[in-house]
Amino acid sequence: MNNKSIKVDNPLLSPERWLTEYGDYLFRYAMLQLRDEHLAEDVVQETLLAALECHQNFSGNASEKTWLVGILKHKVVDLIRKKVREPTQENLDEQMDHAQNDAIDAMFDDRGHWVTPPQDWGNPEKMMEQKRFWEIFTECMKRLPPQLALLYSLREISGMATDEICKDMNISPTNSWVMLHRARLGLKQCFEINWLGQE
């Protein structure tokens, strides 16, 4: 790492507070995306360094936290692109967890209808405000196969366009929709058991 000090001359920023005020949030966000503590720590450090280096670009149109999360999203996506393009990636079908596929198939009858209709989850906005919701969400994401969790995070949390995700993950749009469907069903099942207490 470079030892030169960076002077922040932007009065809209307070970098001395970034780690204490936003560090935990940035780390949780990175963990949700990457599911690896060491990678999450690294990407948060890279985010804070990048923010220091490009502090003059901060215009104040968004909060510091929003600006930092924007930088973090780009760092996470860059890391994911690098990981996806590594030659060690196996065939997606081989990575799918067969037990999960069987569990998903068991949710539907021969005509494709729900065996047990989805339950009322109450007010989704109120649920998302609760700390316990995010703890369960994180655990449910960890239970998904890695490729499903990655695709779900990129599409639903980071808001990446489907065509961009397909290009980065080297999958077809049809495959991406099937994978998203499986991820949503897996999360639904996990939430019904762990959040709503249903079997």
Image (cartoon, helix red, strand yellow):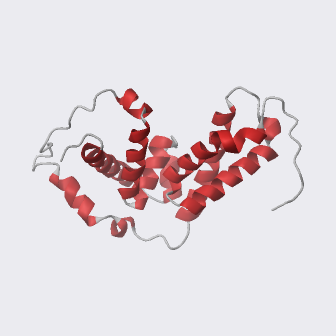
Q: Is residue 25 left or right of residue 173?
A: right
Q: Is residue 137 left or right of residue 55?
A: left
Q: How many marks?
A: 0
Q: Quadrant of residue 63?
A: top right
Tell me what residue is drawn at x 56 percent, y 64 percent.
Answer: 83
In the image: residue 86, left or right of residue 56:
left
Q: Nearer the viewer, residue 105 or 24?
A: 24
- As drawn, the residue found furthest toward the bottom would be 88
Q: Residue furthest left?
A: 110
* Residue 192 visible in the picture: yes
Give x and y (percent) for residue 108. Answer: 15, 48
Q: Which residue appears at 15% of the width and 46% of the height?
A: 112
- Residue 5's x, y, as percent? 89, 51
Regarding residue 144, the answer to whether it shows in the image is no
Q: Where in the figure is residue 142, as x and y percent of width and height?
A: 40, 56
- Location of the N terminus by quadrant is bottom right
Q: Quadrant of residue 96?
A: bottom left
Residue 130, given in percent of the width and then of the height, sits at 42, 34
Residue located 15% across and 54% down the image: 106
In the depicted structure, whether residue 164 falls above or below residue 102: above
